Amino acid sequence: MSRIRSHSEPWGSIGERLRRRGLRWTPQRATVIEVLAEGDGHITAAQLVEQCRARDPATIPSTVHRTLDVLEELGLVRHGHAADGHEEFHVLPATEHGHLHCSACGASWEIGEARAIAVADAFRAADGFEIDIGHVTLVGLCRSCAALGSTPGRSD
Amino acid sequence: MSRIRSHSEPWGSIGERLRRRGLRWTPQRATVIEVLAEGDGHITAAQLVEQCRARDPATIPSTVHRTLDVLEELGLVRHGHAADGHEEFHVLPATEHGHLHCSACGASWEIGEARAIAVADAFRAADGFEIDIGHVTLVGLCRSCAALGSTPGRSD
DNA sequence: ACCACTATTGCAATAGGTTGCAATAACTAG
DNA sequence: CTAGTTATTGCAACCTATTGCAATAGTGGT
């Protein structure tokens, strides 16, 4: 059995998947993937570099970035953008979901699959647009900040 | 009458508005505002720097960025994020609107006030979230790319 | 008109991420 | 198991955007 907590199935055979495409299985990539497999499915490149360094102090940022590019091509991660526009990565498999950010109190949270699909359906019906709801973090005011009449800040 | 094409009213008295707040009216700020007032209401900081240089080759990027911060505090511009997360500025006054970007063909376009309000209403009703629809560019597949079964690229 | 005050500028230094390239090492074939 | 091929790495140079600070120059008061 796998020793990793989650997403265990698709991660186990990555070495083979890489080799089948003429790519290579390296210790650096193994480190990146270990960290990704143990995380909660959301991570920024900077956080990933930091966590890789905990395992291998020789970790080089550019290698991590390039590994993420490769993993995205393989379909194992997808990048999105946080409220401030910075790149963040979603580790797959993940259910369809979205991110909301309150620009007044700075809170961020997710909307579940049902809501995400409802939003996507609404766009598809109205514009014929097949929205990738998870790609960007939607910004606005949360219920309580809106009720308080808070003004949007510049948290991003 | 004003010589500028659009947004003429709020821009005329900026010098006074700045001074009333203890801020100053400088030639550099005048250059930035001239360019903003003549544009179409959407601009990135880099584009703004470039256009300011056409008028004043001595334009310094950091000055432009800081001027934009001031104008945002005054409520004359609002920043948002393009599909790739880069900052872009909306010149006010502007009607509520949103931006869509197709990750397959790279096209970007706007959704009008009616659709923007409909989206905002839907979020308010479902989540109590007061979405700032114009803040981020929504990414996905346009009608024709979706119909062709295009795969999302990495244009961002 | 001048002065004092201080917001603003311009520059230099910094930070963060990206890119080019020679050296390394993973992989495949024999 | 060995050797050749070439993907990948690590480093350094680079680029864009941000920040600190001394010098400059708008402003309001006299």
Image (cartoon, coloured by chain):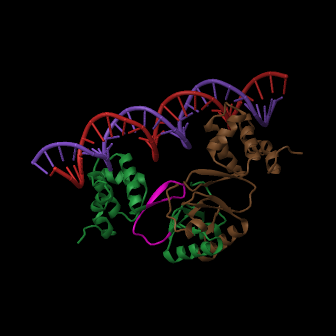
Chain colours: A brown, B green, C purple, D red
Q: Which quadrant of the rendered structure holds the C terminus of chain B?
A: bottom right
Give how far across and how far down residue A156 sits, in percent. 52, 54
> Residue A131 lies in magenta, yes or no?
no
Give how far across and how far down residue A55 sits, in percent. 73, 34
> Residue B79 lies in magenta, yes or no?
yes
* Residue in the foreground of this view, choosing between A107 and D2: A107
Q: Is residue B58 visible to the viewer in this orientation of the structure?
A: no
Q: Which quadrant of the rendered structure holds the N terminus of chain B?
A: bottom left
* Residue in the foreground of this view, choosing between A137 and B54: A137
In this rendering, the answer to whether A2 lies above or below B116 is above
Give how far across and how far down residue B120 sits, in percent. 56, 73
Q: Is residue B13 visible to the viewer in this orientation of the structure?
A: yes
* Residue in the foreground of this view, choosing between C11 and A13: C11
Residue that appears at 71% across and 32% down: A56
Q: Is residue B62 left or right of residue A84?
A: left
Q: Is residue A61 left or right of residue C11?
A: right
**Can you tell which quarter of the image residue B101 is in?**
bottom right
Give how far across and how far down residue A1 sits, in percent. 90, 45
The span shown in magenta is B78-97
* Residue in the foreground of this view, choosing between C2 and C12: C2
Residue that appears at 29% across and 51% down: B28
